[in-house]
Image (cartoon, helix red, strand yellow):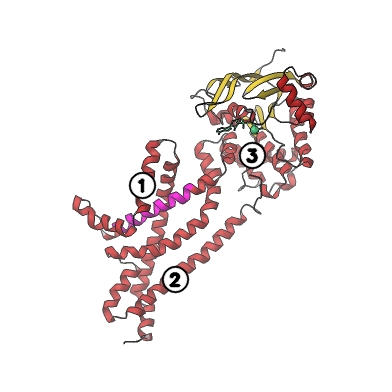
Amino acid sequence: MQEQTKMIELNAVNKWYGSNFQVLKNCSLTVGKGEVVVICGPSGSGKSTLIKCVNALEPIGNGRITVTGVEVSDPKTDMPKLRSKVGMVFQHFELFPHMTILENLCVGQEKVLGRSHKEALVKAEALLERVGLTAHAKKYPSQLSGGQQQRVAIARALAMDPVAMLFDEPTSALDPEMINEVLDVMVALAHEGMTMMVVTHEMGFARKVADRIVFMDGGEIVEIGGGDSFFDNPKTERAKSFLSKILAH
Amino acid sequence: MKGWNWEGFFEYLTNYYLLEGALITLGLTVFAMTAGLFIGFFVAMMRMSRYKILSAPANFYIWIFRGTPLLVQLIIIYTGLPQIGIKFTVIQSTLLGLALCEAAYLAEIIRAGISAVPSGQVNAARAIGMRESQVMRYVVAPQALRIIIPPLGNSVNSVLKTTSIASIISMEELLRRTQVLIQEKFLVLELFTVAALYYLAMTTAWELIQRRIEKRFGKAYGPMSVDAH
Ligand SMILES: Nc1ncnc2c1ncn2[C@@H]1O[C@H](COP(=O)(O)OP(=O)(O)OP(=O)(O)O)[C@@H](O)[C@H]1O
Ligand SMILES: [Mg+2]
């Protein structure tokens, strides 16, 4: 394995919901700086949970998670500060419906990072241009299509100048004709060297940009493979049967 | 049979003492709503806490004040408490009773509003690094406010009328003053009709205001979203 600066590291992470349902089982994974890791697996396998643990939206049971060397699970860690450095994009966009697009992009910059309104606006406008939505700056989220909303959501995360980005099925709530406009933004981001953890079943995207594919099943990381080798030669039976199911579509 | 006295009716309709009573009723309403919202917010936050030391007292408070009539609460505060050495004036008792009782109702309205904000919104706000107080202030509260505006408006209407209960401990609001004036000429029907008209004028005026507020808050989001979630 090539030598890389570690960006995100999960070490033997276990997590339970309630007292007897173990949702994550001994998960270990290291994501290097600039690396793109795609996480896939059947529904209920713990993908969303895993990714939420990385920025402490979900607490873990035991084990260790570090982001840029800072321990997420340490109660002394300033969690909001750490989260502000890790962008997150959700399946259902989760734009703030009571704010305009521009306000959505500014609120974090101003209230969390303490930037002036002017500074925030400059950044927000640049990002809107980048995702091709300058014309919609003054609109409310409900006036945009799903694909547009998701691009705004990516821009909102980028406005915080994150060191890494987490995506939880960013295209699975979208109509098929809108998927590519969102994937294009993500591909561009990957090519710029953004560290990314992406839960997705978009295998075209995974082949194109993923450095590694993580396959999860039943709360376990069953297999980690390089982009093409995972698809062409899955090592485990579980991965094989999963791939045959999703490729059948 | 005395019949209806128009002259007396119009005289009381423009009676300064009564008009002032109506203004006091209005003042009590504004106070009950303001104090009730303030206390109610904290009670709601306590009630939603995962710590029992906070949620249990809040539950108890809501249970007591929503489960007993305001009339009984006022009598206990004004007439009962002096027996154990706690004395309040009529005005103090009225303000205290109205605020505490209303806070219990508003706490439930506020709690419902806050719980109705999808958890995905909270996660999104946390994910950009907001602290819990900022999540509440910039993301949850504005959306909860929109949800609770209709029930809040209905509360104002109901408090306007409920203040009349304070007349029982001789608080000089609209109803009490009506009763006082009856002693002058015993124009019972005329006076109570005047009082009813005053209440009706106030609740109607509020309804118009409420409609405008609801319209305005409806606009702020743009067309309603018909999202999947
Ligand atoms: N808050 C919760 N309380 C209890 N169980 C939960 C909770 N959240 C998720 N689970 C359970 O944990 C398991 C993993 O959930 P998770 O959302 O991480 O799966 P996933 O791999 O993202 O699935 P999907 O592809 O459907 O999004 C599921 O069985 C789910 O029912
Ligand atoms: Mg999921």
Residue type at the position of mark 1? Tyr
Q: Quick one: quadrant of the N terminus of chain A?
A: top right
Of marks 2 and 1, which one's residue comes earlier in the chain?
A: 1
Residue A120, which numbered label?
Answer: 3
Kindly identify which chain the residue marked by label 3 belongs to.
A
Q: On the rendering, which quadrant does ligand 2 occupy?
A: top right
Q: Quick one: quadrant of the C terminus of chain A?
A: top right
Q: Which residues are magenta?
A: B92-111
Residue type at the position of mark 3? Ala
Q: Quadrant of residue A3?
A: top right
Q: Position of residue B29 (x, y in %)?
A: 40, 61
Is B227 placed above or below B215 here?
above
Residue holding disc 1: B61
Kindly identify which chain the residue marked by label 2 belongs to.
B
The local secondary structure at tag 3 comes to helix
Looking at the rendered image, the disc whose residue lies closer to the viewer, 3 or 1, is 1
